[in-house]
Amino acid sequence: MVNKKEKRKYGVSLSENMGQMKIQQMAFMIVAVFFFFVLVGLFFLGIWLNDIKGSASQLQKEQTISSLGVIADMPELNYDSSESMTIDEDKLIVMSGTLGKDYDLFWPVASIEVYKIYPSFTSIKECPSVDCNYYMIYDNKQNNTKAYSSYVSICKKVSERGSVYDRCEVGKLVVGMKIHDE
Amino acid sequence: MMNNIKKEGQQEIVGFVLIVVLVVVGLMVFLVISLKSPSENERSSEVSNILDAIMKHTTECAIVYDPDYDNFEDLFKSCHQKNDCSNLDKSACKYLNESLRDVVKAMMGSEATVNYYQIDFFVKGETPGILTFSEGNCTGNVNMAQRNIISDSDSLVIRMKVCKTISRGQETDL
């Protein structure tokens, strides 16, 4: 039991302090619970956005391969119309030579290059030449471009011991596309 | 009276500390998951494109006569049928193992962001596989694709797994 003297001494200021303490406690609780739910929300939002990002990236890659497929499947480069992503090496030789200059206004991109990937090489040797590994088809010398690449098959007809057969090698088609300023 | 106030104060402090710990743990989990979230894509168009290019590559192995060379798709079938390369005096499987490693290594060598690749060749529903090889340590995004080939009455599966480091600048490059 608190006697009257003590009540008089502590009573009023104690209940005031207790009230302040309760308000502080409630404020801390509200802030903490708010932050907790915000973090939980951010966590789920992060997972959801990551899925969207992944899907967007995947779609962009598919679209890029499809766009590169359009270039590779053009009659000017394509080896066999029934096969996608297959480039004719003889056409590459022609298009990378002087005849290719006539097509400068034809290409809807900033640059087109083709590399032979296998056998692997340490230095780039432009075709046509012995043991070459690189064809420059077109380059409009434009700055502000981004290169996109995709694997293709570089094929040609080869005659050996009286037989003619299709010889295909692994190559890489690199297409430069203009980056539009926003 | 004073003891009661002290006890209540201690309880408040414990409660407050518990809430702070809870929030910090939530923050840590959120940070760990948001910073480290490698995705796995089992039908990657990128890896599918690599497999397409590999399958069409003409090898040096001729099973029946020279120069009737197999491409990799035919070489997988020849290996499954336990044929020999008549022009090289070695089995199709041995040649496949050697040449496929070289071709894939050359292809992956041209990819700056690839840190791991793995090729598995097996008959569907059978273990162990006919051929398996890998190189590197897998970190970052995992991309996979596979091709199914019919040889005799079996279904052959060629599966490729590629791990790429997450690089914002090269996300759209293939």
Image (spheres, coloured by chain):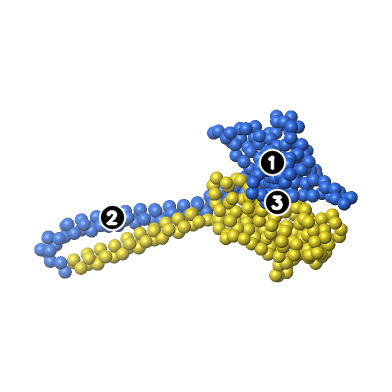
Chain colours: A blue, B yellow
Which residue is under mark 2? A24
SS class, disc 1: loop
Q: Are marks 3 and 1 on the same chain?
A: yes
Q: Chain of mark 2?
A: A
Quick one: A23 or B162, which is closer to the camera? B162
Residue A1 versus residue A107 in the image, above or below: below
Q: Residue at x 22, y 65 (%)?
A: B6
Q: Chain of mark 1?
A: A
What quarter of the picture does the N terminus of chain B occupy?
A: bottom left
Q: Chain of mark 3?
A: A
Which residue is under mark 3? A118
Amino acid type of the residue that numbered disc 3 sits on in the rendered structure: Tyr
Residue A1 versus residue B48 in the image, above or below: below
**Mark nearer the viewer, 3 or 1:** 1
Q: CA distance from mark 2 to mark 1?
A: 76 Å
Amino acid type of the residue that numbered disc 2 sits on in the rendered structure: Gln
Which residue is under mark 1? A126
Q: Earlier in the sequence, mark 2 or mark 1?
A: 2
SS class, disc 3: loop
Amino acid type of the residue that numbered disc 1 sits on in the rendered structure: Glu
Q: Are marks 2 and 1 on the same chain?
A: yes
Q: How would you rate the neighbour count of disc 2 (Cα within 10 Å): few for under 14, some for 14-19, many for 20 or more?
A: few
Q: Earlier in the sequence, mark 3 or mark 1?
A: 3
Q: Residue at x 74, y 48 (%)?
A: A153
Quadrant of res B84 = bottom right
Q: Picture coordinates of residue B79 (x, y %)? A: 78, 64
